[in-house]
Image: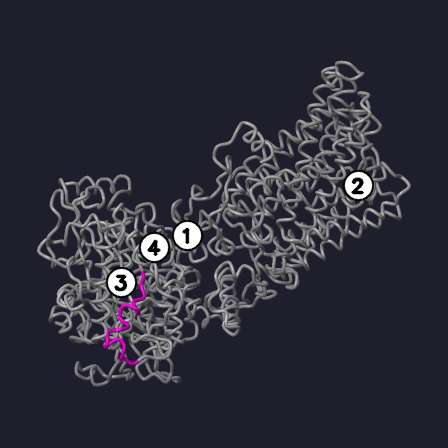
Amino acid sequence: MGSIGNTPDVYDYIICGGGTSGCVVAGRLAENPDIKILVIEAGQHNRDLENVHMAGGWSNNFDSETDWNIITKPMPGVDNRQVKLSRGRFLGGSSGCNGTLCIRGAKQDYDDWELEGWSGEEFFAAMRKAETFHTKPWFQADQKSHGYSGPLHTEPHDLAPIANLLLDSFVSQGLPLHHDMFSSGDIPHGCGHVPRTVYKGIRSTAADYITKEYHRNNVTIQTDTTVDRVVLEQGPDGLRATSVITQLADGTPRTFHARKEIIVSGGAYCSPAILMRSGIGAREELEQHGIPCQVDLPGVGKNLMDHLIVFMFYETEKEGLTTDFHVYHDNNLAKTYQQWKEHKSGFLSTFPFGSFAFARIDDRLKDEPLWRDAPRQPGRDPMGLTPKQPNIEFFTTECYGGPKQYNQFPIDHKHAFSMIAELFAPKSRGTVTLKSKDPKENPVVDCNYLSDPLDMLVLTEACRFGNEIVMNGAGTKDIVKGSWPPNLKHHTYKTREEWIPYVKEHATTCYHASGTCAMGKDDNPMAVLDNKLRVKGVAGLRVADCSVMPTLHGGHTQMPAYGIGERCADFIKETCCLTAPAYLSGIMAVQDNMTSDAKGLEVSSAEKRRRLADKVRLRSNKVNSLRGDHHHSDEESNEEVQESETPDLKRQLKDRHLQMIAIGGTIGTGLFISSGTAIAHAGPVGALIAYIFVGTIVYSVMTSLGEVATYIPTAGAFTSYTTRLVDPSLGFAMGWVYWFNWASTFAVELTASGMIIQYWREDLSIAIFIGVFWVFITLINFLPVGFYGELEFWFSAIKVLTVLGFMIFAICIDAGVGKQGYLGFHTWKDPGAFAPYLIESNVNTAKFVGFWAVLIQAGFSYQGTELVGVAAGETENPEKTVPSAIRKTFFRILIFFVLTIFFIGLLVPYDNPNLVTDTSNASASPMVIAANLAGVQVLPGLINAVLLTVVLSAANSNVYSGSRVLLGLAREGFAPQWFAKVTQRGVPYISVAFTAAFGLLGFLNLSESGGKVFNWLVNISGVAGFICWASINACHIAFMRVLAARNISRDTLPYKAIWQPWLAYYGLFFNVLIIFTQGFTAWIPTFDVSDFFVAYVCPILFVVLYLGHKIVFRTKFVDPLEADLDTGRVETKSTSWETSAPNKGWFERAKGRFIG
């Protein structure tokens, strides 16, 4: 075999057929820019085909040059009728002219294949990978059943009134409502809604994988080119596919060469024809057409399966139920078309299918002799189905839209709708054979419909059941006038025998052909492919389309076609990678080491994580199977002890908890004690400006966090966002620094608690209270998270009332109630609005130094606002509660911080010596100092009691948030996996214990001045907070890049903040600036090693962790197209949460404004 050079007609991979699966394979392989891909499509490009993009124009593609126009042989089972098998003959194939329906089937359907890599869990994951799902407010989506980062955009369909009535009829006839049942693969009996491949009025097709925003220069699309055959050459290891011979539109032959592989994706009719023309098939059949047989595979073209459907139309005289008037009445079609043309809305923006149902009909057939006596396998019915799989499907239309043999459209003021019965798991099998070896001639197709009597039995019973639903169902029994067209009388049929002639006359294809190049095990003589889709006996040749399915699933073939394309791409990536994927601690994927001259396909880290997650789920399912846990309800499974590698926390925090956590997380010792130091260093106006300035930074952080956390409210902590969106090394460093922040601050708060109690009893050692409160807080955090939320609610309420009370007190004192008389703004004049700090030579410079020095103190005071992001993963209904908490952040900052600093500055001059002290009890509080100056003696003891609740609340939050951060680190593979273990009630007990242990560092205060240790830890934790905030801003910027790369509008976010994304850049700049400059005081007046260490130990630790992880694991910045937006997506939209009553009094509204 000669070498192949870099000629224009040489590619790494050639895809023969630009249909659904073929486009998917091409798009996924093209993610590696170093390879060249050719897609050969017999039809034209789809860009100019309006009836493709306009979903309602689907039928205009039939019987045209964009249709393959395949017609079956006459078939005895349907009264020797021929059936038209329309297929899309353009780029994107039938994904551009199908019914847009996303009905995946049952997971058991794919488990029945018994092929490695094709289990129900694995195949559903592949279908999710293709999808970006957009929900609607009324739709109760099963979020875990959908994908959110694929090229295929899907959304539910707004139903016409008749479809809702049919849902009522389904339910009344024993088919319960499950909104999103057709996406989960677990419900064989019920009714619901079906998402469609339409978004914003435009059909989404497989061509989107290689066009529009996914267009790539390494993909060549060769349209109007028919594949003749694949050339097979004999090599040292046997036959290998090396090139493809084609015919251009004018009949000119052209050959394309493949360096690596050729993938045949012509569909269930054309793929076997291509193989047969290439010499692959049953020897005797090939020889009849003068084709030398190179690989004798008798299964090629056999095992043809299709879903057979029967339309049953009904007339109603009640107006306003159906949508016929949009197209059939009063010449409205022109107006309807113009509506789509101008606004991409209206009837033609979607497909007129309505409601859907799956059904098991064993009980309806149990007394029928043919059914009762038919052979069956254990645990299965005569069709080979288990109780987990439906026998039939019903779907409905919202107007007339039936087969052309009816040929009677509703005239003005006539209204029709349909019930369609579909047969699953047909026993009948057909064939695809060659008419000749001319590639321009369509193959001969014999679907052999209803050749097995069981098929007729089940389908006639399905029609009988469907008719009963319409005629007797609660929603439709009173609106049906009769059958449509009026000459039909099926609405009167009662027995299966009456339905047999009707079925024979009206049964037609559902366009779900499959099985003609079936996968199978080595011992299956009829198998054409192995489980990796490789053609048996030929190297470098695969098939990827619905022809590969060994048995026909109980669903529609659109989503499986996407899934087959995804799996094919996965298999190719696996075989051509030179290094197997590696994982860090079983979760975090590290990059493959690929040689520089290799042109293999790199598997993205996001894809590796997704594959590993699938394996984890599979292992969990196997464990459950061994235990006999086959039928657990959601409630039961939620109560089990979490033993998987990625256990879940519990969503037990209510709206009021989250609101108070958002407040209480900000009000602590920083406001009650450290604010006095801020006044002393910067003066009343300098401190006020510093707090306002840092407040704007905090607002940028909170809105950045809010947009990401409501989109992905991950259980554990928000630190995982950095790993998934920016850089794994950045997530590693930020996570550990943030955890250290909370663990060390726990020691600070315990130390402060002892010092506060010493205000009353100086003779008592702080060690007593460090120990007592350490035990108390630790035990609280071993309880379910609801206890933490409840305790924090009441702690925070005390803080809020104290701050509000102080403001009222301050207004009174400033107005002259105290012994000092009227104060006004006297402190702004004497000693002044700005305080000079450290520098004596230049007063103005000294004042700026004071202002800048206060920024780190303000940062410590505000630290904790981001706790909303930590708690989001354990909050009920996070899409509503988290935005609500974040929206009020600005008002909390304004009221509880800025006004408090403002009033303190009015009452206490910055030169008061009591503002700068090493104590942490009430005597150090500027509120108490203000009361003493005013001659109010009762306030110090009260403030001291409040301070005790403040530090206990802070300590409680320290352990909670630190343990959740540690849990998140473990889940990302950045900490030992035992930190991820949780109890039956969702408590990460090992993470809680380890974090709480650091509180014992508070005992170090026994050996030296407690005040100095307190100030050291305050500064260290304050800098860690700025690092965390900067990382959150960086996450939001990366999040915006990911959304833009995937063409996801910010308008679709559950929470959309004002001034974003610009606020994220603003916050990132100033957070980084403060981190770098906050330690400048270490050089004034001379360099102090101790002060330098306090200021920069945290940034230095962060840099060391980041660079160390980067060097060891060679991580890369996350590609926007590979970022993981799926894991942790909101799974709660289908849950009904308790909400407050809508009618609130003025007090409730005021409370909600200020404290949630």
Between the residue at mark 1 and the residue at mark 4, the CA separation in whole angstroms equals 11 Å
Between the residue at mark 2 and the residue at mark 1, the CA separation in whole angstroms equals 50 Å
Q: Mark 2 highlights which residue?
A: 1015
Q: Based on the displayed image, in which of its 4 quarters is residue 27 positioned?
A: bottom left
Mark 3 in CB contact with mark 4 (< 8 angstroms): no
Estimate how packed mark 1 is, as few (under 14), some (14 to 19) or many (20 or more) residues with alpha carbons within 10 Å.
Answer: many
Q: Is residue 517 visible?
A: yes
In this view, the residue in front, 964 or 628, is 628
Between the residue at mark 2 and the residue at mark 4, the CA separation in whole angstroms equals 61 Å
Quadrant where the N terminus lies?
bottom left
The magenta segment is: 358-375
Q: Mark 1 highlights which residue?
A: 141
Judged from this view, the residue extending furthest toward the right is 763
Mark toward the viewer: 2 or 1: 1
Q: Mark 4 highlights which residue?
A: 192
Q: Mark 3 highlights which residue?
A: 41
Q: Is residue 603 visible?
A: no
Mark 2 in CB contact with mark 1 (< 8 angstroms): no
Between the residue at mark 3 and the residue at mark 1, the CA separation in whole angstroms equals 36 Å
The residue type indicated by label 2 comes to: Asn
Estimate how packed mark 3 is, as few (under 14), some (14 to 19) or many (20 or more) residues with alpha carbons within 10 Å.
Answer: many
- Give the number of marks: 4
Mark 3 in CB contact with mark 1 (< 8 angstroms): no
